[in-house]
Amino acid sequence: MKKPMIGVVPLVDEERESFWMLPGYFEGIEEAGGIPVMLPLTDDPEAIARLAETCDGVLLTGGHDVSAEVYGETPREVCGACCPGRDRMERLLLDEALRQDLPVLGICRGVQFLNAALGGTLYQDLPVEHYSTVVHHQQPPYDQPSHEVSLLRGSPLAERLGVKTLPVNSCHHQGIKNLADSLSAMAYAPDGLVEAVWMPDKRFVWAVQWHPEFSHKVSEASREIFRAFVESCQ
Ligand code: MN
């Protein structure tokens, strides 16, 4: 069988005027049998359509905060740095991927962007808007768990992993407030925060708030998430 090619949204560093990539995203895809390809940062609809046709799946990576405008709010002071270029690109890319029913995996910002783009809302800053004792913004090493999540029984993630709870790493200060109508929750943190979602009427649209790209070397569950994604791209 041909290895699926996965388009990976680039990370953007404005200070260094560079696009970059965390090896973990690529390694996770490669270990699972896929070929990762970093996409250009573009909001040209024709380019996005061609890229989506060429790729067998799309990975929405972590990174900047999602602009509050994406979910119809005014940015508060607690909102972190945003990247309008990524917001524009990912909006087009997600629309195209959903139109073509391409598999999509979202990680961290990816789960937030997916929810916001589909009509949900976000906490602009968890400590201020959803205070809890759960450590969502852990210190290194990032391959170690920070809190547990409960997997929703019967959800594809619970079925795939065969467990009820999962220790996960956590490095986010934003999170899902209202879940988009077209998404269903797959995992909750102990403070009630939605930590994983899927789109029931699509072939494979999953997104997690934690970081399998940091933990794939030490966590079988993290590798299994990449495998589920890459398999669905075949
Ligand atoms: Mn968390």
Image (tube, grey):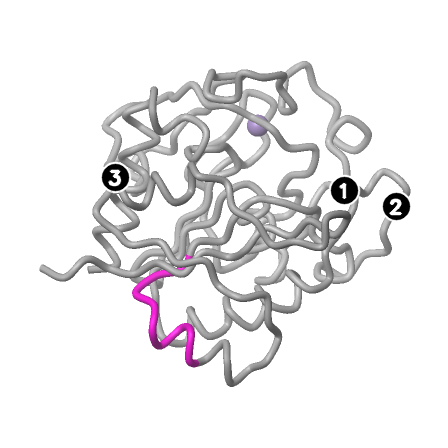
Residue positioned most to the left: 1
Please tell me whether residue 221 is drawn above or below residue 28 in the rendered image. above
Of circles 1 and 3, the one toward us is 3
Determine crowd level at label 3: few under 14, some 14-19, many 20+ residues with C-alpha closer than 10 A: some
Q: Earlier in the sequence, mark 2 or mark 1?
A: 2
Give the residue drawn at x 69%, y 38%. 174
Question: Three-letter amino acid code at disc 2?
Answer: Arg
Q: Is residue 223 above or below residue 87?
A: above
Q: Quadrant of the C terminus?
A: bottom left
The residue range painted magenta reads 50-58
Q: Quadrant of ligand 1?
A: top right
Of mark 1 and mark 3, the one earlier in the sequence is: 3
Circle 3 residue = 31
Whether label 2 touches label 1, CB < 8 Å: yes
Q: How far across and down, in percent of the image, does residue 206 sit?
A: 40, 49
Q: Secondary structure at mark 1?
A: loop
Q: Which residue is mark 1?
A: 124
